[in-house]
Amino acid sequence: MYQHLFGPVPSRRLGMSLGVDLVPHKVCTFNCVYCECGQTTRLTVARDAYVAVDEVLGELEHYLAHNPRPDFFTLSGAGEPTLNSRMGEVLAFLRQRAPDGRIAVITNGSLLGDPQVRAELAEADVVMPSLDAASEATFRRMDRPSPRVRLPSLLAGLEAFRAAFHGEVWLEVVILPGYNDSAEELRLLRDALVRIRPDRIQLNTLDRPGTASGLQPASREQLARIAAGWGLDNVSVIASAPSSASAEGYRTDAGVAILETLARRPCTAEDLARVLGSSVEAVVQQLAALEAEGRITSTAQARGVFYRLAGAE
């Protein structure tokens, strides 16, 4: 069982994505109310070698030797990947060892004001930052950042990164009713997006259980209205995770793959079936066995029954 890799998992934006986790659960600069990975356990902006990068590179070497290429190698996981001070080494390794592969980095954008972070990210093909608010009050209420992260510096970092980066920037905006969907908040967001100039703007909403109670997802109709109201030609609404036409990137060690995936985020049986390229019925049998062993637990939510590692609530 890999300690630092997970998947490939079906991503709404990246197809079949092999996740590379560079920080322990849950080291982050934010503690977002909607985070599917759970509460932040270490809220920090300090860059450090949080995991043994030599182990990460060894796992990647093993994966490359025994599996077909995924659609993307994606630095993401259960925290903020740019916090790892050796992130650049991982990106350089992937560029050298898998030159035909594509590399993405999913980040909250909080460290893009650091020139060293921007230089390391130059090796990526796609960088996917997030921006949920363009007012300080909503930013702090929704993303609950470290006290050392202020919105003006975050926005300036996004603009500086876009100006220097030669790859694509896909910026995600998570819409949460009652948080950032008022006319004023949406106007401020649009103004910020125009200044940042990302290649794509992707509207998303709550899909899995968050860290705060009482959260409700926006409807697709609401997201479509927001996209239309902004009047920008690069805005899209993110749909559910797509099925892949090919099972080449899928894992065959089902039980291990399920546990690796649930270690990062809760999933339904349908989510896991897409990870494995398997039937839902087969996955349900695996989940029942793991639950009987006390290794996972289940919780009913609006979108279905979500499974997670035991003790991860």
Image: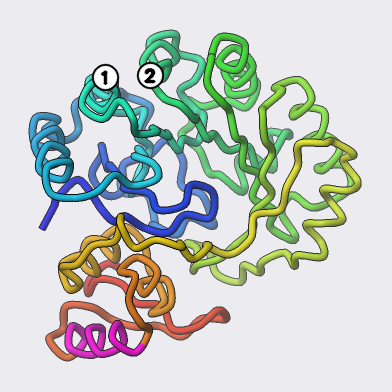
Q: Is residue 308 left or right of residue 65?
A: right
When the figure is inspected, residue 207 is found, relative to residue 110, above or below; the finding is: below
Q: Is residue 11 above or below residue 308?
A: above
In x, y percent, where is residue 24?
Answer: 23, 44
Specify whether 288 is left or right of 9. Answer: left
Q: Which residues are magenta?
A: 281-291
User: In this figure, which residue is indicated by the disc labeled 1?
Assistant: 92
Proximity of marks 1 and 2: CB atoms separated by less than 8 Å: yes
Relative depth, front residue between 234 and 64: 64
Classify residue 285 by image quadrant: bottom left
Residue 102 percent across, percent down from the top left: 39, 33
Q: Quickly name the residue at label 2.
A: 123
Q: Quick check: is 287 in the magenta stretch?
A: yes
Is disc 1 surrounded by few (<14), some (14 to 19) or many (20+) residues within 10 Å? some
Q: Nearer the viewer, residue 1 or 143?
A: 1
Residue 20 location in percent, x, y? Answer: 28, 42
